[in-house]
Image: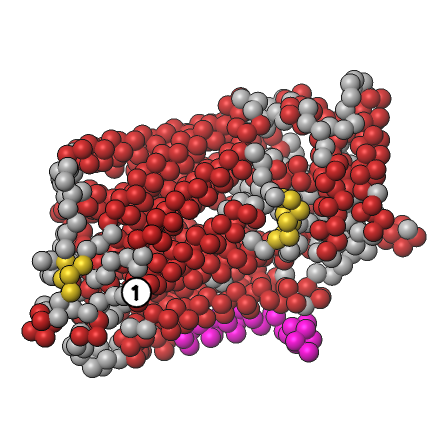
Amino acid sequence: MSSPVEQDQLESFSYDDKLIKMFIYATLFWGLVAMSIGVLIAFQLADWRLNFGLEWLTFGRMRPIHTNAAIFAFVGNAIFAGVYHSTQRLCKARLFNDLLGRIHFWGWQIIIVLGALSLAMGKTMGKEYAELEWPLAIAIAVVWVIFAVNFFGTLWRRREKHLYVALWFYIATIVTIAVLHIVNNISIPVSLMKSYPIYAGVQDALVQWWYGHNAVAFFLTTPFLGLMYYYVPKAAKRPIYSYRLSIIHFWSLVFIYIWAGPHHLLYTSLPEWVQTLGMVFSIALWAPSWGGMINGLLTIRGAWNRLRTEPTLKFMALAITFYGMATFEGPLLSIKSVNALAHYTDWIVGHVHSGTIGWNYMLIAGILFYMIPKLWKTELYSYKLAGWQFWLATLGILLYIVSMWVAGVTQGLMWRAMDESGRLMYPDFVETVIRIVPMYYVRGVGGTLVLISFVIMLWNFYKTIKLAPKEQKPEVFKAAPLKASVPSHGESTHRKLEGLPMIFSILTTIAILVGSIVEIVPSLMAQNFVEKDARVGPYTPLELAGRDIYVREGCYLCHSQQVRPMIAEKLRYGDPSTAAESIYNRPFQWGSKRTGPDLARVGGKYPDMWHYRHMWDPREVVAQSIMPSYEWLFRKEIDFGILPKKLKVMKSLGVPYSDEDIATSKESAKAQAKKIADRLKQSGVEGKIKDKEIMALIAYLQRLGTDIKKEKIEVEND
Amino acid sequence: MIKDVLKNFPYELMPTLVMMGFVLFFVAMVIWVFRKDSSEVYKHAESLPFSDEEKRS
């Protein structure tokens, strides 16, 4: 309650709710786009014909559009709506600057549109969740800084001294995402929409998955925990269960999360100690994650009866439950022996969707059911429709997760199955694929139900907003200025800290930097991190061009290039991958999923003609293949002109190309392409093929894994 | 110098060292969070989401 002193000094102010409404509209629009594309690509995996033979519509290009739309467009806009809405109220202050808010909004939407177009055109960095090329990466950094200025400016203008726990999570999000995005995206441009990362091979893998994992942590988790700590008490009409627990939750989570990235690289050529650190801290994450889940669920204590009728609470309870399930499954999958089975399978796909659909979509729905009637000063149009949405979404996500569990475990077991004589029981990779295709249909049905539930929510909100009074006058609030507020109790150190956003932010930054530095710096500085292998050389100009086509088409989304040190993998693919093999790989292409087989040792396994026919129509060489056709590679010509520039950039990054290599790169690429074309012509291929992109891709694929097959003596003689 | 240190560091001890560091940090945090007379502080903090509803004009 206000003290008499405050009553004299109350200031009037209103909130910038127009901006919140803009971000809500964007959330709903991009949610529909992201989920629709998700359903399309789910069915593309079930039936390859749904790629329609169009290059921009193939799975390899649509999948990054789906993930970027879901994470950065749908979830991102929801974060901005929720953060701006709750921060103004927790600070009792209008947003720092209305114009900055509009620049933030339109800047973000423009980046999303340009990002989607560039990905459809195959302009990609080839790093998961960080695909956008350098001009867009810079634009993201600029807009994020604008967001940070607006957020911290609001804290600076606040009328409530103490920063509520939700704001801590927002601070951690803003600071950490800035660090992750900038460090992971440092690259040297070759052209307006092409660049090479400054990191290579193992270093690139480590930095990328430090980013990739923490994008999940600090974009899909921490902002939503902040939103949970604000909106669940508001919806339940009771304070958070334990504020003490929220402090422990915050500091533990922020400290531990940053270490867990290497669990994406278990059994790879990453040094063992980094893998162990990643695994240990992933398991440690169980405690803070479940602490947060328990804190959220117990906040609803005494209000469980309202779950039956109030959509806000119903969706929030389901979201927190899914958060608990996903954060149980994540550390479980990080245990090396479990990871050996699950990695590269659909189990991981199911896991990430239990997070993004179960946790993010459900919490967004709960928050929107709270916010929209309040912001538009009206009542929800239909509670019955909200109920339908709830059950369809729940059924859909369960079908999705269960089908991916079944598919993942089935395929993982088939990959490693050996008979009594020690031979693989399913040596043809495609055998393990066709076994799980029925599960891909079930997943598609589950995704469709989730999409239908979203459309129902859209209709419900459309009708709700239609019901709103036409004249929407902004509400005026009153509060005492910060300097007039009187501390009610002797202040503790942490309370003082909470009142100092800058120092609080610096401490949060230190917490996330400790893990980042310990894990990454040794790999960047110590020379012995990757022991060089004299047999491994840089790619020829044509192979480099082919590699860029491989990246452009998103081949890494279905094919890994990392043979793990396991008997079954050695039998299926060959010797385990070494760190030295990828020292010239910018970006690294180890992948995270095997919808098709690993390609690290594919070089020389098949003749050129096999690859030629395979890319034209995979069914010509593997009858039951689910891979799309890449007919445009047979029409498009190789861009020989850009090769000297590409080699020059590579040389500047330390790849041992000589000046002569750079000067003769066009001629050398043309000569190598002609050799491949001549071999193909001997096998009966007709027409002018020597300048087509397929030549470059064949050159690259035929090079993969061949270096370490060379004899050491042969290298020495060379 | 820095490179030499990084080169020769016994990295196999790293998971144990870091975990011990975190456990110490965690225990200290738990003791501090449950310090004497802190209940009033947390009571005020947990009421903050509701304070905006008191002061509408």
Residue B23 among those drawn in magenta: yes
The crowd level at tag 1 (other Cα within 10 Å; few <14, some 14-19, many 20+) is many
Q: Which residues are magenta?
A: B1-26
All told, the count of numbered labels is 1
Q: Is residue A299 visible?
A: no
Which residue sits at x=27%, y=33%? A458
Where's residue A549, x and y in %?
66, 36
The quarter of the image holding the N terminus of chain A is bottom left
Q: Is residue A666 visible?
A: yes
Which residue sits at x=30%, y=34%? A454
Residue lying at the far right of the rendered structure: A717
Residue A20 among those drawn in magenta: no
Q: Identify residue type, mark 1.
A: Leu
Where's residue A641, x and y in %?
74, 38
State whether residue A402 is above or below residue A628: below
Which residue sits at x=40%, y=39%? A401
- Nearer-the-camera pick, B6 or A149: A149
Q: Which residue is mark 1?
A: A155
Where's residue B47, x and y in %?
17, 65
State whether residue A707 is above or below residue A678: below
- Nearer-the-camera pick, A301 or A123: A123
Which residue sits at x=54%, y=37%? A118
Q: Quadrant of residue A459 in the image?
A: top left
- Of all chains, the one bearing label 1 is A
Say left or right for A28 vs A512: left
Q: Quadrant of residue A525 in the image?
A: bottom right
- Nearer-the-camera pick, A168 or A106: A106
For mark 1, give the secondary structure.
helix
